[in-house]
Amino acid sequence: MTEILVPTLGESVTSATVARWMKKAGEAVAADEPLVELETDKVTVEVNAPAAGVLEAISADEGAEVEPGALLGTIAAGDGAGAGKVSPKATEKPAEKPTDKPAGGAAPKVEAPRQESGPVSRPGGSGHAPLPAAAKMMEENSLTAEQIGTGTAKDGRVSKGDVQAFLSRPAPEAPKPAAKAPRPLEGGEERVKMTRLRKTIANRLKEAQNTAAMLTTFNEVDMTAVMALRSEYKDAFEKKLGTKLGFMSFFVKACVAALKDYPAVNAEIDGDELVYKNFVHMGIAVGGPSGLVVPVLKNADQMSFAEIEKSISNFGKRARDGQLKLEELSGGSFTITNGGIYGSLMSTPILNPPQSGILGMHKIQERPMVVGGKIEIRPMMYLALSYDHRIVDGKEAVSFLVRVKESIEDPRRLLLDL
C-alpha cells in the first residue's frame, strides 16, 4: 500500500482545501497521474499518484481542510480489478467510546469557579477572622471574606495560600457573539461559497487597510516617447530576442531606478524595526480564473528588458492556466498592477502586505496638453502610488512617482542609468 500525502505547500502556506478528486475509489491509476487538486490561499496544486495501482481509499473528501503531510488516500497494488474491495474512508466517524456517566442519567455538572466584581457567597464560611498574612493580602486586593469563603486553615480560617489560590483562578470567558444567520435569498439570487483564494484576497486587503497608514499620491505621464521607441524597435526586438516589447518592462525598469533612489518604498516594517532590502523582487499583478495573483520577478534589478518581458508573458499564461508555483508568489518587495488593460482610467491600489508601496498603471488616453506654449494631443496615463505612511514620508512618495514619470517620459535615462 502507498500513501498519498499532502505535499509541502510553500512559504507561509499552512493548509489547503481538497478541491476535486479526479479519480474515484477503486479506479486504476498510473504513476505520476494527477489524482487530486488542492486549493491553497494562493494557487491550485495538483497532487500526482506516487505509484501505479488502484486508488484503494480516499481519506480526505472534497471540501476538507488538510495540512502538509496529511493523508489524502492510499493506493493498493493492482490494475483496478479489485474495485469492489475498497477500504472504508479514513474520515468515517469512529465508534463512540463508552462514557463514565452514571447509569441513571447524565454526568454530574461541575461549575467552574467564578471571579466577579461584587461579593460572591460560598457555603461553609467559618466566621473566624483570616490569618494575618491573608488579611493583609485581602486588603491589598480589595477582597472580602465572603468572596474567599471557607479557608483551609484550622477552624476554616482563610490562609495566605487560600487568597493566592483565589487570585489565580481564571476569569470567566466572555460569551462569544452569536453567528450571524445568512439572510433569506430573494428570487433570482444564489449563494456560492467563497474559494480560499477569494477569502485570502479579501482578508489581506482588509488587513492592509486596518494595519498600514495607507495613502495614495497621483501623477500623470506622457507616453509619447515610450510609444515611439516601442514602435520603432518592436519588430527588431521580437526577431532578435524572441519576445514582444511591451510597456511593462519600461515601468519595471523605471520603478527599479526609483526604488534605488528612495529605498524606504522598497522596505517593510517588522515589529518595531525597519527592514531595508538591497534587491528588488518585483510583484506583477495578473488576473487568473479565480482572482488576482501576484507572481514575483526575483532580482528584477538585474534583469534585462527581454528577460522581464518573457517572465511577465510566462506569468500571465500560467496564471490563466492555474499553473503558477507557490514559490513564485512569495517574497515580493514592491508591486505593479495595471488596471489599464481592463479600461481603468484611475484607481487607488491597495498595498500587498508587508510591502510598503504599490504602483497602479492605468489606461492610455489621448488628452489635450500644453507643450511648449501650444496645445497638443498626447497619449497620457494616470499613475497612482499607494504607500505606507508609517515608513514612507509624503515627500519620498511624491519624489518616487516623479522619478518614475521622468524615466517613462525620457526612456534614455533608463539606458544611461540617470
Image: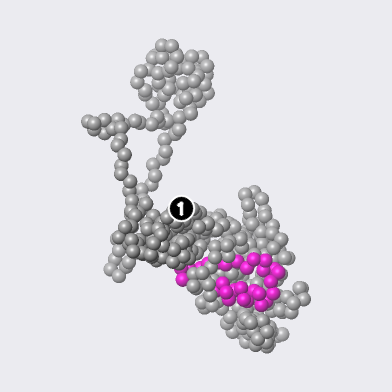
Front-lying residue, 327 or 75: 75
Is residue 188 rendered to the left or right of residue 252? left
Front-lying residue, 90 or 188: 90
- Residue at 61 percent across and 63 percent down: it is 332
User: What is the x, y in percent for residue 143?
Assistant: 46, 24
User: What is the x, y in percent for residue 119?
Assistant: 40, 26
- Viewer can see residue 339: no
Front-lying residue, 67 or 84: 84
User: Does residue 329 lie above or below 252 as drawn?
Assistant: above
User: Does residue 313 lie above or below 388 as drawn?
Assistant: below
Q: Is 400 one of the magenta-colored residues?
A: no
Which residues are drawn in magenta?
Answer: 289-316
**Mark 1 belongs to which amino acid?**
Ala
- Residue at 66 percent across and 62 percent down: it is 266
Is residue 245 rendered to the left or right of residue 129? right
User: What is the x, y in percent for residue 66?
Assistant: 44, 54
- Residue at 28 percent across and 68 percent down: it is 187
Within 10 angstroms of label 1, few (less than 14), some, or many (20 or more) residues? some
User: What is the x, y in percent for residue 211?
Assistant: 56, 54
> Dividing the picture into quarters, in which one does residue 255 lie?
bottom right
- Residue at 39 percent across and 14 percent down: it is 127
Name the residue that disc number 1 marks: 70
Is residue 144 rendered to the left or right of residue 216? left
Q: Is 300 one of the magenta-colored residues?
A: yes
Label 1: which secondary element: loop
* The C terminus lies in quadrant: bottom right
Is residue 196 rendered to the left or right of residue 403? left
